[in-house]
Image: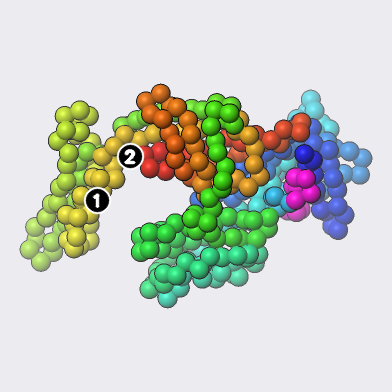
Amino acid sequence: MTYELLIQHQGAVMLPPVVESVSIEWERQGQPGKLTADIVKTPGLSFQEGDPCRFSVDGTPIFYGFVFEKARKGSMDQVITITVYDQLYYLKNKDTYVYSNKTAAAVIRMIAEDFQLNVGALADTGYTIASRVEDNRTLFDIIQTALDETLKATSQMYVLYDDVGKLTLKNIGDMKLGLLVDNETAGDFDYKTSIASQTYDKVKLSYENKDTGKREIFIAQDGSSINQWGVLQYYEKIDSTANAKAMADALLSLYNTKTRTLKLKDVLGDVRVRAGTMLVVMLGLGDMNLSSYLMVEQVKHTFSNEQHVMDLNMRGGTFVA
């Protein structure tokens, strides 16, 4: 396995030696891809913030971005630590948009055109959003709102990511890998169960009826869970009583369980794995034997000394990130 880190500055292409390792981090939403590395300041090496950077494994590019930070230590003045972000970084910009009759994919294309971002394959999300007013919000949030509206309407989840320099949108159903993580391929794991967050055994929805001046309350609760855990209440004000009781029951069904977090460490690396990828995980966790597809919420790839390992935060079912 061979690695190549390339930086381009004013038409010149440089291949700086890497001191120890290169790491790449991807998250499913709200953050750009990030590459970090310590490189050697060799004679003739010259580059600046904003210069493009590409990282390849066995000749195949897997990351493309731009140098955003350079750092040095006085005791190691010949080593430069670089931080490179892919073009999703520019979705941190804020703006105001008013749009109508657009799919989430069309919203992404609109924003990409305005901010001169390169677009690759965008899945046809199908659902048309009637109208939205997005005032002084990050581009990340504007796009995520469109994807959330699509999820509510179609039950289909999509993941936006940068694929080596091109904005890409995929349905998570198309991101399954025939990759198994078990005791043989995972170095270690951290597993935790909790009722301290995202667990509720009572749901209370409140509607302010302006016509009558009275407040209408809709409640769903589980007495056995309350006896065991105490009252853990979810409260929300709603704009309409339409399907309010069904909504309360659905929320109780969703939240009336303990949550689990699973972080897999030093997993045998695979460059196809990114945030949003679905993997099969088969592990004995103590209180349960897990054998299921889970989604990668966050991944950190580390390439060093001809070795490639991954740290993965998993999500799915009662597993939260």
* Residue occupied by mark 1: 250
Circle 2 SS class: loop
What residue is rendered at 28% in x and 42% in y? 255
* Residue occupied by mark 2: 198
Q: Nearer the viewer, residue 130 or 183?
A: 183
Q: Quadrant of the C terminus?
A: top left
What residue is rendered at 41% in x and 63% in y? 150
Tell me where residue 268 sits by quadrant: top right
Residue 260 in percent (x, y) is at: 39, 34
Q: Quadrant of the N terminus?
A: top right
Residue type, numbered disc 1 = Ala
Left or right position of 305 against 11: left
Circle 1 SS class: helix
Left or right position of 318 against 67: left
Residue 211 in percent (x, y) is at: 10, 66
Give, as a single range, the part of the protein colored magenta: 49-60
Tell me where residue 290 sits by quadrant: top left
Mark linked to residue 182: none
Crowdedness of circle 2 by 10 Å Cα count: few (<14), some, many (20+)? some
What residue is rendered at 37% in x and 25% in y? 287
- Residue most extreme to the right: 43
Closer to the camera: disc 1 or disc 2?
1
